């Protein structure tokens, strides 16, 4: 072959999110393509949200919406917009039974099991949205569970331990738009090619370095952390650690997924059970990180084993490189 020609022969194939999921489904003969429908809806919603995020200031949709969500937090206009986009994209998928959002007090029942509702999708439509006002990174986080057709109560249907998730992922709206997802067979990274309008697989089977001396925590609250966390931070200060904190969970976790390190949101005076929500923030992040060789704890428990009892339940979180989390647990395990 002409040597010049060879330089144009790609060493790896061009795989989109869609073709990657279809290939995954082909491994499971019983899969009926249902799952691809959900992933394509999430991918469509992510592209629509990315477009809105990048034009938010030009379209005058930054800042407060003027209402509070069920958490009592000021809703940003873009929280409401992103929430509506995801509901419109997911609502059209005939195999989704229940959707639940950080922005809505109750889950929404779209259809029963007997009407084809096979899955439940939970999401934080725009995590860290206050970063938008300063052109900072924000994200969407999603979790997919199987529907329980014998359970009539929507909240009980989605209040399942994170180990039952069939898929989880996030989209990071930063200098590029990255989508990270797992279906329980490793964690894969896709990047949105704005010219193709597709998420392109750029790395399958991400692995978090087991150790990296960077911790991520809001040290402004250190006086109200449990003493064990204060002792751990002193250990970090004396052991040559650096600190990074973006204030958007997806962005801080993505840094850890790419380079390693540890993120902590301990119990504080304002949030004695932790600030982050178990079902649509901690659980999907925990599945993603564990599938990439990391660890995720909520107090003394593995996050994915915590049994939820409320849709908007909060938990403390300690997530990242396996050896970094193990070091931190030596301080906090007795809490
Ligand atoms: P704090 C954003 O509001 C968020 O829910 C996460 O994305 C982020 O990690 C955390 O809260 C930041 O909280 O108290 O440090 O501002």
Image (spheres, helix red, strand yellow):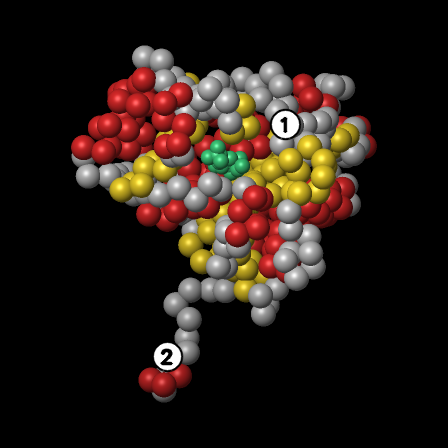
- Residue 193 x, y percent position in the rendering: 54, 64
According to the picture, the residue beneath numbered tag 2 turns out to be 7
User: Residue at point 65% right, 28% down?
Assistant: 72
Which mark's residue is nearer the viewer, 1 or 2? 1
According to the picture, the residue beneath numbered tag 1 turns out to be 71
- The quadrant in which residue 92 appears is top right
User: Residue at point 46% right, 19% down?
Assistant: 269
- Residue 67 x, y percent position in the rendering: 72, 35
Q: Above or below — where is 75 with respect to 201?
A: above
Residue placed most toward the observer, 154 or 234:
234
Q: Quadrant of the N terminus?
A: bottom left
- The quadrant in which residue 298 appears is top left
Earlier in the chain: of badge 1 and badge 2, it is 2
Residue placed most toward the observer, 144 or 123:
123
In the shown orientation, is residue 263 left or right of residue 178?
left
- The quadrant in which residue 16 appears is bottom right
Residue placed most toward the observer, 109 or 245:
245
Residue placed most toward the observer, 266 or 68:
68
User: Residue at point 23% right, 33% down?
Assistant: 237
C-alpha span from label 1 to label 2: 55 Å
In the shown orientation, is residue 60 left or right of residue 135?
right
- Disc 2 is placed on an element classified as loop
- Residue 61 x, y percent position in the rendering: 68, 52
| Residue 181 appears in the rendering | no
| Residue 289 appears in the rendering | yes
- Residue 120 x, y percent position in the rendering: 67, 32
Q: Quadrant of the C terminus?
A: top left
Label 2 neighbour load within 10 Å: few <14, some 14-19, many 20+: few
- Disc 1 is placed on an element classified as loop
For the residue with label 1, is its CB less than 8 Å from the closest atom of ligand 1? no
């Amino acid at each position: 072959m002409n040597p010049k020609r060879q330089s144009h022969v790609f060493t790896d194939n061009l795989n989109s999110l869609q073709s990657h999921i279809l290939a995954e489904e082909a491994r499971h003969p019983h899969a009926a393509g249902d799952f691809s429908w959900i992933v394509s809806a999430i991918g469509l919603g992510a592209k629509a949200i990315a477009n809105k995020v990048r034009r938010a200031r030009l379209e005058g949709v930054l800042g407060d919406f003027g209402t509070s969500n069920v958490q009592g937090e000021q809703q940003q206009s873009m929280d409401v917009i992103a929430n509506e986009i995801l509901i419109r994209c997911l609502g059209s998928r005939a195999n989704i039974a229940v959707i639940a959002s950080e922005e809505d007090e109750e889950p929404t029942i779209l259809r029963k099991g007997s009407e084809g509702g096979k899955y439940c999708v939970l999401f934080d439509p725009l995590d860290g949205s206050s970063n938008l006002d300063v052109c900072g990174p924000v994200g969407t986080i999603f979790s997919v569970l199987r529907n329980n057709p014998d359970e009539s109560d929507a909240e009980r249907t989605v209040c399942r331990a994170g180990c039952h998730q069939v898929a989880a992922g996030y989209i990071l709206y930063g200098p590029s738009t990255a989508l990270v997802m797992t279906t329980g067979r490793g964690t894969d990274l896709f990047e949105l090619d704005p010219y193709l309008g597709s998420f392109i697989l750029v790395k399958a089977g991400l692995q978090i370095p087991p150790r990296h001396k960077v911790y991520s925590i809001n040290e402004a609250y250190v006086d109200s952390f449990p003493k064990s966390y204060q002792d751990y931070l002193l250990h970090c200060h004396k052991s040559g650690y650096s600190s990074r904190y973006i204030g958007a969970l997806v962005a801080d976790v993505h840094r850890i997924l790419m380079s390693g390190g540890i993120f902590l949101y301990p119990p504080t005076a304002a949030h004695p059970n932790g600030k982050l929500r178990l079902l649509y923030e901690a659980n999907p992040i925990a599945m993603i990180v564990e599938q990439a060789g990391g660890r995720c704890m909520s107090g003394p428990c593995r996050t994915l084993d915590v049994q939820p009892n409320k849709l908007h339940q909060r938990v403390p979180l300690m997530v990242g490189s396996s050896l970094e989390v193990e070091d931190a647990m030596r301080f906090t395990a007795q809490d």
